[in-house]
Image (spheres, rainbow, N blue to C red):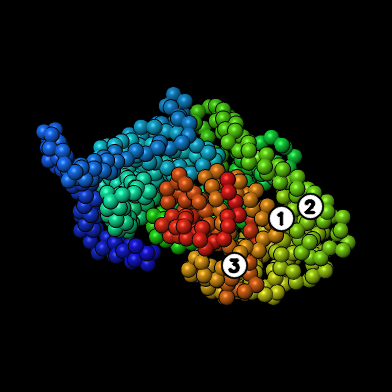
Amino acid sequence: MDQADFVHLVRMSEHASADNSRAYRRSVAVFAALGYAWVLGCLALAIGILMWVVPQLLQGRIRIALVWPLLGALGLLWVSLRALWVRFEEPTGVEVTALEAPELFEALERIRRKIKGPAIHKVTLNDEFNASIQQLPRFGLLGGAVNHLSIGLPLLMALDRPRFLAVLAHEYGHLRGDHGQFAAWIYRTRLSWMRLNHSLADDEGPVGAATQAFMRWYFPRFSAKTFALARQDEYEADRIAGKLLGRQVAAAALAEIEIRGAWLQANFWSQHWCAAAGNPLPVGPYRSMRRRLAEPPDAAFANDALRQALKRISSVDDTHPGLRDRMEALDAVPTVPDWSRGTALGLLGSDAKRWVSHFDKQWCRDNATQWKQHHAWLERVRVRIQTLGEATAQSNAVELVELARLKRHLDPRADVRALFELALERSPEHPAALRSLVSCLPNEDRDGKLALLHRLWDAGSSDRYWAARTALAELETPRLGMDHDAAAFKQWRKRLDRAQESEERAWEELSGTSFFSQIARHDLSSFELAELQSELARCAPLTRCWLVRKNLREHPQRRAYLVFFELPGLDDERRYHLCRTLERNLCLPGPAVALWAGESPTLQEIGRSAFEPVYTR
């Protein structure tokens, strides 16, 4: 099934759910039962054939004509049993017990009683900026479920107790009584079919071919048909969180998570890896993260991060709705929240430092090789800085911008303003120098920032969207002693609308056209390629990466890229979120779309059309 057909089926399921929710749920139950009927029917057919063949063989009637039914029945029996008892790995992390964190378990019990949900069987603490409850089937398609709560230490450090409890209430809301039991059953069934679909992908022979044909027909239709139910369940979980903790608390938690998460990805992790310049052995990040998360994010960054989050539409790639839709469902105004006062670490007990130390040590163990590689890369950066620095008097704007950027690799707080100003003396409209100099000016120099953004706007269309976004974020941010400039805000608002139309056309070219049309080999220099490879080495699930340049008609001068990843061992939802993270944070000299090798595009298509890999683990 291609993407257009899948989207069409999703929209049909959403309309059916809106028109008659009960009838829609009945149809979902019937279609889910069809999958069970196929598995049980295959099992019954296999047993029937064996019951017919085996007695004849035992009686000595050994004929070649009986061998093929016997082999086929055994293959069918094996596939059926795999489907019924497909196993799932438990979430990773360190188990937390009620003795260690009594307040956490008391809070969970209060939430459980209020929503009439099932018990949590296991609570684990991990290093993700997230929290989730997973119902893992005990025995595949048949049998009960085990409820696992996974809590991310960074989330505990970022949110105060009420907002963190709102997150837990949302997750627990998926397991609520009444309709929640049906939604949870469908969720487990989706998970089972997804795992079964992946496990059967490499089966060969007639039985494997038959089961794969059924899965190719059934699984995408089941996913599309149940999509509306999964999306509704997210809204209902938000509603429960709002009811238990208050709508404003739940909404503030959603906004703060978006902004803090964007800050971690855009600022914190890149700055932490910079520490490899002066430390050949890895340094744990979580002690520093705890301190940094206690500080409010930069106001302009927060405004822009929230605007970008609100702009993302609810798509069929993820059952979670977009932030704007979730805010509207909570009847809350989407604004930058007052930041959390304190953290929720107290829920883990009195010895929170022990957990921070544990995950610091674990991170150092897990990233020792990548850290050493990055340290070696930064040594090369140091040499390159020395080479460029010796020729500053003769350097052009491109070389000066590169020198400044490399200095920031070694020290994120390095004062490189003079290099960007010198680059603009030698090339007054150099876009990268204008962009970079904006971030070097102090917050109180709003006029200077806007003047640079005006020059960047006038320089050409390729950077106009960024210029308008940055100007609006600055104008929306209250500054001590500065009045709101309504005229400038209106001007940049109109500019953003114009630039956004062009940006959307360019993005449609980049992401919406055929993957392998309008492409060429990547144009990275050897130094840029080495920088990219250093970043890819830090992505543990990645085994191979391909990079191609996409030639855009909307912005012919823009360097834009498609990046293809081979990510074995992950389900599609985790691959999707990892690709979005890499898309935002890879150090490429232009926008990129990240895709993984799966059903579309396949690994074979990538290997055939995307030239040679730029990285292999």
Quarter containing the N terminus:
bottom left
81 horizontally vs 463: left or right:
left
Residue 541 coordinates in the image, percent (x, y): 52, 45
Q: Secondary structure at mark 2?
A: helix
Report the amino acid beneath label 3: Ala
Q: Nearer the viewer, residue 24 or 388?
A: 388
Mark closer to the observer (1, 3): 3
Tell me how far mark 2 sits from mark 1, CA to CA. 9 Å
Please provide percent x and percent y for residue 354: 56, 28
Query: For residue 520, which numbered disc appears in the image?
Result: 3
What secondary structure is marked by label 1? Answer: helix
The answer to whether residue 396 is above or below residue 542 is below
**Residue 527 circle label:** 1
Decide: few, some or many residues near mark 3? Use Cα within 10 Å; few <14, some 14-19, many ≥20. Answer: some
Depth check, front residue: 439 or 376? 376
Q: Earlier in the sequence, mark 2 or mark 1?
A: 2
Residue that badge 2 annotates? 384
Local packing at callout 2 (Cα closer than 10 Å; few below 14, some 14-19, many 20+) is some
